[in-house]
Image (spheres, rainbow, N blue to C red):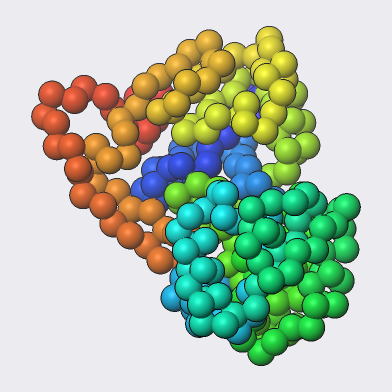
Amino acid sequence: DNSKVTIITSGNCDDKTLDDIINFTKQNNYNLLTYEYNFSKIDSELLSTYDEIEKAEQIITIGDIYRNNSLIARRIIHAQKNDAQTINIHTQKNLTGYNSNQFIQIDSYDTIDEQIQSIGLKENTIIIINQIDTNQNYEKVIKLVKVNNIKVLPLLKHPNSYSSLEKITPSSVDEIKNSIDESELVIFINENPIEYLDDTILENKDIISLTEDDTTSETAIPIRLWCQSETSFTNSMGTTQTYPDAIQDSDNNLKTVTEILELI
């Protein structure tokens, strides 16, 4: 029963691999899921570029940027040198809040839009989101961005999460749990669900894992590293970057995800 087969993938896959996984799933009527940490697809015109961060008049950060994304942290520091006002909102004290002009500690993200609106938004404001607890609360922020005609930069989890969100509707943790419960075979492709699921949920399930990382799967199939093939990823700004085969090892016998799917 093909409806009892679930494939779970992520933005760890490059653009071509994601397309091949989607086609493979449709051809076989399998379930295809991805978890993107409560982020979802948004209009590209809402997105801030990295360069725009340095020129912003006001930067509102949600979550700890400094500890989790040094590239963006440096951009924020440059903006501060240009007299940008920085406000951090988080459920706990953190490094970004310590280095901001203002830190707002909240008990819940449920009123995140009201908290942001109460700050007094400036015309050239950018909201940078490192983490959010639900997609509903994320969408509250996106609605606020649209209404106030400002910019936002979600810091997505994986190198190709932007493409993943463009191509696959993301699921919540509960939706993934339910799908695994109803499945007989679960195939993980470049995804380690133990990062967000209790490993007991995988008990008594037939599991195949196509991944560069170790998992708890019974059957792990090693795959070729992304840097061992010509590939492309799309970053959080929506900019697609193409990379050549950096290794060029003619003796490498590992197959790509696409090659393995063709053999199944």
Image: 71 above or below 141:
above
The quadrant holding residue 260 is top left
Residue 181 at x, y = what percent? 75, 23
Q: In this view, does 36 lie to the left or right of 140?
A: left
Image: 21 above or below 59:
above
- The foreground one among 258 and 128 is 128
Could you tell me which residue is drawn at 40 percent across and 28 percent down?
Answer: 212
Could you tell me which residue is drawn at 18 percent across and 37 percent down?
Answer: 247
Name of the residue lying farthest toward the left? 250
Residue 49 at x, y = what percent? 48, 73
The answer, for residue 229, to whether it is visible in the render is yes
Residue 244 at x, y = what percent? 21, 49
- Quadrant containing the N terminus in the rendered view: top right
Name of the residue lying farthest toward the bottom? 123
Q: In this view, does 244 lie to the left or right of 28?
A: left
- The foreground one among 16 and 138 is 138
- The foreground one among 186 and 52 is 52
Image: 37 above or below 123:
above
Q: Is residue 220 left or right of residue 226?
A: right
Residue 25 at x, y = what percent? 52, 38
The answer, for residue 29, to whether it is visible in the render is no
Image: 247 above or below 86:
above
Could you tell me which residue is drawn at 69 percent across and 71 percent down?
Answer: 101
- Quadrant containing the C terminus in the rendered view: top left
Q: How many marks?
A: 0
Could you tell me which residue is drawn at 80 percent across and 78 percent down?
Answer: 119
